[in-house]
């Protein structure tokens, strides 16, 4: 992974605006109610790729050669997300779901080969951008894409889903309008009170990587929440966009005798 300068500098902005790290919702992608989001006025979605929708690349060290080897990126959708991903694409419509990755589609993706692979595997476009998340140039590229659609999508009509605080969540919160800091009526809809993209932090990590950094990110979020727990804009109820995780169907493992009796009953 290339050095992410915008990501390194992002924590320093927290000294001035610590609320940037607070997601509006933390849940599993399979529990996101996309239809409820659409009914609330959200019309587009931005998704991270690595360890959010697909696997992440793994580094392994060979003991005999003492050299570092890399397992290629996995560009296929995690099987557990197939139903949720199909629902998301059908709900928001063609072109309104966009992958924004710090690997595929960046200047480090030679020839855009990985972006093409990811777009083919996930059936959605991949943003081409030169600045990594959460950089402001990346935000400008996202805005340019959604404004270029036949029916343009505004910032406050977007949902941003990712697994990292210092990239995905901060990027989404940087897109909020200044009007979002103004007081709203307690019965105002969530989208109006947020004043920008809905930042969803996914807690389903498909491969354990950067766990120390993730632990640091969570501790920072917990600290900021305790410091600003009485703030009006932190009390937006987004639980209406979450549903229960469907239970897997029980497997039928009857004995041979049971199966034989069932066959006799059918005759």
Image: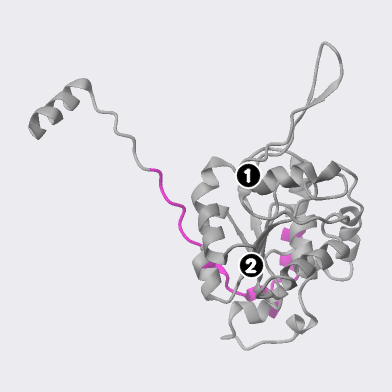
Query: Compared with residue 71, is residue 127 higher up or lower down, i.e. above or below?
Result: below
Report the residue at 54% width, 47% height from top: 81
Give coordinates of residue 37: x percent, y percent: 55, 69
Mark toward the viewer: 2 or 1: 1
Q: Regarding mark 1 in the picture, which secondary structure is present there?
A: helix
Q: Which residue is tagged 2?
A: 44
Work out whether residue 113 can be spotted.
yes
Front-most of 226 and 154? 154
Which of the 4 image quadrants contains residue 137? Answer: bottom right
Q: Which residue is tagged 1?
A: 121
Give coordinates of residue 13: x percent, y percent: 89, 65
Query: Compared with residue 247, is residue 174 higher up or lower down, i.e. above or below?
Result: below
The reply to whether the magenta stretch includes residue 242 is yes
Q: Regarding mark 2 in the picture, which secondary structure is present there?
A: strand
Q: Choose the circle earlier in sequence order: 2 or 1.
A: 2
The reply to whether the magenta stretch includes residue 221 is yes
Label 1: few (<14), some (14–19) or many (≥20) C-alpha neighbours in 10 Å: some
Give coordinates of residue 192: x percent, y percent: 65, 82
Q: Which residues are magenta?
A: 220-248
Report the residue at 74% width, 86% height from top: 182
Quadrant housing the C terminus: top left
For the residues labelled 2 and 1, the Cα–Cα distance comes to 19 Å
Front-most of 218 and 200? 200
Label 2: few (<14), some (14–19) or many (≥20) C-alpha neighbours in 10 Å: many
Res 196 label: none
Give coordinates of residue 213: x percent, y percent: 79, 46
Front-most of 178 and 219? 178
Query: Compared with residue 263, is residue 216 higher up or lower down, i.e. above or below?
Result: below
């Amino acid at each position: 992974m290339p050095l992410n300068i915008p990501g390194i500098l992002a924590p320093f902005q927290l000294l001035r605006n610590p609320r940037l790290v607070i997601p509006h919702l933390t849940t599993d992608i399979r529990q996101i109610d996309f239809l409820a989001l659409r009914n609330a006025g959200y019309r587009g979605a931005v998704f991270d790729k690595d360890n959010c929708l697909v696997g992440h690349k793994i580094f392994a060290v060979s003991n005999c050669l003492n050299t570092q080897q890399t397992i290629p990126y996995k560009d296929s959708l995690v099987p557990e997300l197939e139903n949720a991903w199909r629902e998301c694409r059908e709900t928001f419509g063609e072109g309104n779901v966009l992958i924004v990755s710090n690997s595929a589609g960046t200047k480090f993706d030679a020839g855009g080969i990985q972006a093409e692979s990811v777009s083919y595997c996930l059936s959605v476009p991949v943003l081409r951008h030169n600045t990594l998340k959460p950089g402001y140039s990346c935000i400008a590229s996202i805005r340019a894409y959604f404004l270029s659609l036949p029916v343009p999508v505004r910032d406050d009509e977007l949902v941003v889903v990712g697994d990292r605080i210092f990239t995905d969540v901060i990027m989404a919160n940087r897109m909020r309008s200044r009007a979002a800091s103004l007081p709203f009526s307690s019965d105002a809809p969530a989208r109006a009170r947020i004043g920008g993209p809905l930042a969803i932090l996914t807690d389903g990590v498909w491969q354990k990587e950067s766990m120390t950094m993730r632990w640091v990110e969570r501790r920072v979020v917990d600290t900021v929440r305790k410091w600003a727990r009485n703030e009006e804009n932190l009390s937006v109820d987004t639980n209406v966009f979450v549903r229960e995780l469907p239970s897997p169907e029980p497997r039928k493992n009857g004995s041979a005798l049971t199966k034989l009796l069932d066959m006799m009953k059918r005759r």
